[in-house]
Amino acid sequence: MGLGIRKEDTVMILSGKEKGKQGRVLSVLNKKDMVLVEKINMIKKHMRPNKTYTQGGIIEKEGPVHVSKVMLICPRCNKPTRISNVSLEGGKKVRGCKKCKEVIDQ
């Protein structure tokens, strides 16, 4: 089952403390049905000093958000929309916008 949301997509948060905010998807966690969105759901993590964090201490980073709580923003009409599957002439399937009926992927 595909989630319909991919890395580098712009999404809007539908519920929770970050409701209404928009951000870019940093990564998709398919097995957990979660996404990491830039500057959304920031959590504090206590890190021991290592190669990447030489100082250590408390690090702020993005926490995962369930995919049901985000909605894709169409790059053409700039509105949050559901995703439809569109078949092109060559038999290739791409994502489409339900509101403006345009193809999202090129």
Image (tube, helix red, strand yellow):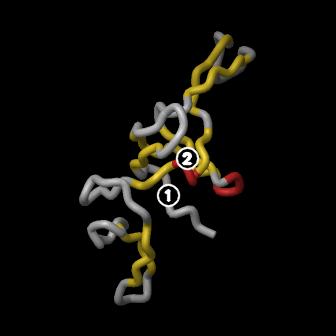
Give the residue at x 61% y 48%: 66
**Label 1 close to label 2 by CB (< 8 Å):** no
Tell me which amino acid carries mark 2: Ser
Tell me which amino acid carries mark 1: Ile
* Residue 33, above or below 20: below
Gap in Å between the C-alphas at discs 1 and 2?
10 Å
Q: Secondary structure at mark 2?
A: strand
Say if residue 65 shows up in the picture: yes
Residue 68 drawn at (x, y percent): 57, 53
Report which residue position mark 1 lands on: 5
Q: Secondary structure at mark 1?
A: loop
* Number of marks drawn: 2
Label 1 CA crowd tier, 10 Å (few <14, some 14–19, many 20+)? some
Residue 45 location, quadrant: top right
Give the residue at x 43% y 63%: 82
Residue 83 location, quadrant: bottom left
Residue 106 location, quadrant: bottom left
Residue 30 drawn at (x, y percent): 65, 56
Residue 41 drawn at (x, y percent): 55, 32
Instruction: In this rendered view, identify the residue nearer to me: 34 or 98.
Output: 98
Give the residue at x 39% y 48%: 10
Instruction: In this rendered view, identify the residue nearer to me: 47 or 43.
Output: 43
Residue 17 drawn at (x, y percent): 52, 31
Frontmost of labels 1 and 2 is 1
Precedes in sequence: disc 1 or disc 2: 1
* Residue 83, above or below 86: above
Report which residue position mark 2 lands on: 27
Residue 105: give its label. none
- Figure quadrant of the N terminus: bottom right
Give the residue at x 67% y 11%: 57
